[in-house]
């Protein structure tokens, strides 16, 4: 298995060598347990996954154990859960948790080593050797130290690193631009929702004041009332019963994602263990609302394909005096989700929402179900159009990230040779040259 990851070592370019990891670097072992207010300390979560960047710094005032010192130019690697691909070239002298290894380059260029640690062959080899079911990690003395590293001549290492610096910068810029496009599209979808749900499909219609800060005006013939006036709310199972591989699908908070229900990771429970004093079974058109945690207030309507599943810890809204589809869109809109539900959950240290609070949410309702359905039909089309564009951009981002990883792998293993002309071309053409 391992040979498949580093078999390239048998076919290195002329002039390249290979050597063990421990013979080209030294591991930093200097520790300190002295608390410091300096923002020069890194935990694993401060390293971004897969990008080679840090996200934040912190101090050691509340760290209760010794930490490792590192120096500028050292290359850091997260040994815990190596599949997270956490690595970085130190840009300052600092300290890190013991779950991060700090390597001092000796016979290898710092940035070439950096790209080696981020390459596909290195990460896959770490994943193959990682031990521990819940918290897999790799060991320096018995595993990493014995890895064989490709070693071009030092000038070529520096050339490869310079090429990858320029290429990855161009790719990262393209990814950043596309992520900004996603933010713009998210805002557009939010605006489409808000306008349709608070103005309707006739923007010139006469309006009236509501007296509510969250939504000052609505069309003159619309109603403005509490969710509980058009729906009933119940709780799901609470504590789940026994798990059964062939049991009934249970929808949990992690399955609910901004109007959709993910079906790829359902937990299944034993129907014989379901409590008799609750009604956990779901019907098509009911709405799941996340009750607590990071995504409190997120919701999704139950499609026909999931009728008969059960609700987990979260709440279920049964709409009986309005269009369920219209109400489902209302619960996703800014004036409900951000303007009301978020404010309700801020009162507790842990975000939490109960049935009484959810029932108190104000919603604007067109006078007839026919008009509500017409607005829901309009939103089905418009939101699907935006989501289609979003999906396309997300695919482009995934392609760019995959290309970045492939490029690093090919360059540090000698499968792609780099010249000074390549570097100049990337610098001149930037993003265009760096894309696949």
Image (cartoon, rainbow, N blue to C red):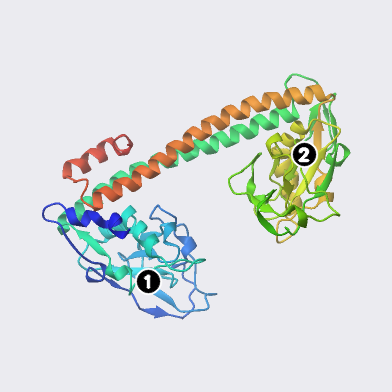
| Residue at left offset 49%, top offset 70% | 59
Which picture quadrant has residue 270?
bottom right
Would residue 88 appear left or right of 191 to someone viewing this image? left
Would residue 264 appear left or right of 45 to someone viewing this image? right
Q: Position of residue 324 (x, y in %)?
A: 78, 33
Residues 104 and 204: in front is 104
| Residue at left offset 38%, top offset 40% | 400
Residue 316 appearing in the image: yes
Dot 2, how many residues are within 10 Å of its Cα: few (below 14), some (14-19), or many (20+)?
some
Image quarter of the C terminus: top left
Q: Position of residue 386 (x, y in %)?
A: 57, 30
Callout 1: SS: loop
Which picture quadrant has residue 216?
top right
Q: Position of residue 302 (x, y in %)?
A: 71, 39
| Residue at left offset 31%, top offset 60% | 2
Q: Which residue is mark 1?
A: 139
Callout 2: SS: loop
Q: Which residue is mark 2?
A: 283
| Residue at left offset 84%, top offset 52% | 278
Q: Position of residue 197 (x, y in %)?
A: 73, 30
Question: Distance from label 1 to label 2 (Cα)?
Answer: 51 Å
Would residue 426 appear left or right of 247 to someone viewing this image? left
Whichever of labels 1 and 2 marks the residue nearer the N terminus, that label is: 1
Residues 204 and 111: in front is 111
Dot 1, how many residues are within 10 Å of its Cα: few (below 14), some (14-19), or many (20+)?
some
Residues 133 and 355: in front is 133
Whether tag 1 and tag 2 are in contact, CB under 8 A, the answer is no
Q: Looking at the picture, does residue 171 appear above or below residue 221?
A: below
- Which mark's residue is nearer the viewer, 1 or 2? 2
């Amino acid at each position: 298995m391992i040979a498949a990851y580093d078999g390239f070592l048998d076919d290195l370019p002329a002039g390249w060598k290979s050597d063990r990891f421990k013979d080209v670097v030294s591991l930093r072992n200097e520790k300190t347990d002295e608390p410091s207010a300096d923002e020069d300390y890194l935990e694993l979560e401060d390293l971004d996954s897969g990008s080679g960047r840090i996200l934040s710094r912190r101090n050691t005032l509340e760290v209760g154990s010794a930490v490792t010192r590192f120096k500028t130019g050292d290359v850091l690697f997260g040994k815990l859960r190596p599949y997270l691909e956490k690595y970085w070239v130190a840009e300052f002298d600092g300290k890190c948790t013991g779950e991060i290894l700090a390597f001092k380059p000796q016979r290898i260029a710092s940035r070439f080593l950096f790209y080696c640690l981020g390459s596909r062959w290195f990460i896959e080899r770490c994943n193959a050797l990682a031990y521990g079911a819940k918290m897999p990690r790799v060991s320096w003395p018995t595993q990493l130290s014995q890895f064989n590293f490709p070693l071009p001549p030092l000038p070529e290492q520096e050339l490869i690193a310079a090429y990858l610096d320029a290429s990855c910068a161009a790719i990262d810029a393209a990814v950043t631009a596309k992520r900004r496009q996603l933010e713009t599209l998210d805002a557009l979808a939010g605006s489409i929702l808000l306008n349709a749900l608070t103005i309707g499909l006739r923007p010139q219609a006469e309006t009236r004041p509501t007296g509510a800060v969250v939504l000052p005006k609505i069309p003159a013939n619309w109603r403005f009332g509490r969710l509980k006036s058009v729906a009933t709310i119940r709780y799901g199972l609470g504590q789940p019963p026994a798990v059964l591989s062939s049991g009934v699908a249970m929808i949990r908070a992690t399955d609910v994602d901004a109007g959709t229900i993910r079906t790829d990771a359902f937990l299944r429970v034993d129907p014989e263990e379901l409590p008799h004093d609750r009604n956990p079974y779901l019907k098509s058109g009911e709405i799941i609302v996340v009750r607590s945690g990071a995504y409190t207030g997120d919701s999704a309507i139950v499609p026909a394909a999931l009728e008969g599943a059960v609700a987990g810890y979260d709440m279920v809204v049964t709409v009986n005096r309005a269009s369920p589809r219209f109400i489902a869109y209302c619960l996703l809109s800014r004036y409900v989700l951000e303007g009301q539900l978020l404010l309700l959950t801020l009162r507790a240290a842990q975000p939490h929402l109960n049935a009484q609070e959810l029932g108190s949410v104000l919603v604007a309702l067109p006078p007839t179900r026919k008009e509500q359905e017409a607005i829901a039909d309009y939103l089905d089309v418009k939101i699907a159009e935006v989501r289609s564009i979003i999906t396309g951009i997300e695919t482009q981002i995934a392609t760019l990230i995959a290309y970045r990883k492939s490029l690093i792998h090919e360059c540090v293993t000698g499968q792609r040779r780099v010249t000074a002309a390549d570097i100049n071309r990337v610098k001149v053409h930037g993003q265009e040259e760096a894309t696949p």
